[in-house]
Amino acid sequence: MENPIKGRKSFLDAFEVTSRLIQRYSIVERTYHQRFQEEDRSSQEGESLKDAITSLYKSVLVYQARVLRHLAHHEARRILSNTFKPEQWAELLQAIQKEKDECDSLSQSIDQNSHLLVEEELRKQSRNIEKVRDELEASLKQQLDAIEVTPPNFYLL
């Protein structure tokens, strides 16, 4: 049987962790939402991240509500509940961790894809710069060739 004081502390510790997750992912959500608006794009990844964060919020809130309801019960009932269903809390936290990992994976994927998009834009700009440079070199060569073929007396006229 679980020590009631230790059990209460682990509930409160988990409650604190889940509260931090809500804080963290509200920032992640705002950041990516703003980024997609600034880039004037929407993507399947962005929608997937939004759905994953929503699912994480739901799981966290369900967990927190169950913890609060459990802690509100009389101590004898809490002890019995812990005795007969201790795995339920671990399963809920594992589900939250799995959803957190999914959110992290999606945000990393979006960052990776954004990085690839930036690299592609840089390559395009580099190709354009080379094209302009080549055109300038060709133009300069034509002008130099025109100067070399012009007879020396032509300038005196």
Image (spheres, rainbow, N blue to C red):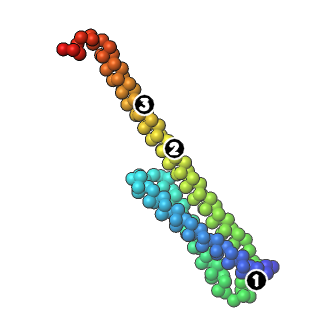
Question: Which residue corresponds to mark 3?
Answer: 130
Q: Is residue 39 left or right of residue 91?
A: left
Residue 132 image offset from top left, x and y in percent: 37, 31
* Classed neighbour count for the residue bearing mark 2: other residues with Cα under 10 Å, few (<14), some (14–19), many (≥20): few
Q: Is residue 44 left or right of residue 84?
A: left
Rendered-image quadrant of the N terminus: bottom right
Q: CA distance from mark 2 to mark 1?
A: 51 Å
Q: Pointers 2 and 1 in contact (CB under 8 A)?
A: no
Q: Is residue 114 above or below residue 130?
A: below
Question: Which residue corresponds to mark 2?
Answer: 116
Q: Is residue 42 left or right of residue 62?
A: left
Question: Which residue corresponds to mark 1?
Answer: 5
User: Tag 1's secondary structure?
Assistant: helix
Q: Is residue 121 left or right of residue 144?
A: right
Q: Residue at x 52, y 65 (%)?
A: 27
Q: CA distance from mark 3 to mark 2?
A: 21 Å
Residue type at mark 3: give it.
Answer: Glu
Residue 58, labelled with which disc? Answer: none
User: Tag 3's secondary structure?
Assistant: helix
Residue type at mark 2: give it.
Answer: Leu
Residue 22 image offset from top left, x and y in percent: 56, 69
- The answer to whether residue 47 of the structure is visible from this angle is no
Q: Is residue 24 above or below residue 41?
A: below
